Image (cartoon, rainbow, N blue to C red):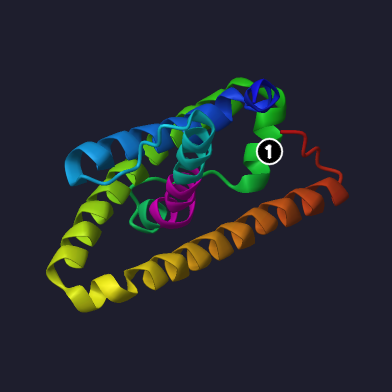
Amino acid sequence: MDKVIDKLSAYNIFTNLFPGVVYCFVATKLFGLSLVPEDLVVAAFLYYFCGMVISRVSSVVVEPLMSKSGFVTYADYGDYVAASNTDKFIGQLLETSNSYRSVVALVICLLGTGAWTEAVTRWSAFGAVSHYVLLAALLVLFSFAFRKQTQYITKRVALNKQGGDAES
């Protein structure tokens, strides 16, 4: 377990583990869910997975909504890569920005969890299929996350082929 913890970067801790721990704790307190296991190994993986879900909601749902609404604007990806090669502080700023975006997604996920638990309680028909709906939603979410990550890789390969340095 110590080796696994040693391999977690600060980015993974603040983007995946921290939101997962906060989500499980708050969801348990607010909605009476049992999301704080006694087994520390199981807890660590559960927290990390919940944090991954929140992080993907952040990336696949929150980011596009904020961008399309004009609430935030982004630099061209090629310009970002070039600038981050000369200004290493840009990477730290991006990590901080992603952390804030993850907190927005955390709150959205908590609101969604509250609505979900209310719906399961009120409508038994929904409660009967809610597990399947949740699994389907996770399938869609991680499929879009996979596609987005693959697009980033493809852009970086193209920048590298053009002679642009894609180090960051």
Outermost front residue: 38
Question: Which residue shows up at 68% across the image and 45% down it?
Answer: 78
The type of residue carrying mark 1 is Val
Which residue occupies the foreground of this view, 156 or 118? Answer: 118
Q: What residue sits 48% from the left and 56% below the top?
A: 60
| Viewer can see residue 90 | no
The residue at which mark 1 appears reads as 81
**Residue 66: x %, y % from top left:** 36, 51
Q: Does 134 appear above or below 156?
A: below
Horizontally, residue 149 falls left or right of residue 100, namely right
Towards the viewer: 21 or 35:
35
Q: Which residue is drawn at 57% across and 32% down?
A: 12
**Most common secondary structure along the magenta stretch:** helix
Residue 68 part of the magenta-drawn span: no
Is residue 53 located in the magenta-colored stretch of the structure? yes
Report whether 39 appears left or right of 159: left
Which residue reaches farthest left?
122
Name which quarter of the figure residue 133 lies in: bottom left
Q: Which quadrant of the rendered structure holds the C terminus? A: top right
Q: Where residue 95 sits: x, y (%)?
A: 52, 30
- Circle 1 packing at 10 Å, graded few (<14), some (14-19), many (20+), is many
Numbered label tally: 1
Q: Nearer the viewer, residue 123 or 102?
A: 123
Q: Relative to 73, does residue 83 appear above or below in the rendering?
A: above
Quadrant containing the N terminus is top right
Location of residue 124 (image quadrant): bottom left
Q: Position of residue 113 (x, y in %)?
A: 27, 53
x, y (%) of residue 64?
43, 56
Which residue is at a point 50% across and 45% down the rendered structure image?
49
SS at badge 1: helix
- The part of the chain drawn in magenta is 52-64
Residue 3 visible? The answer is yes
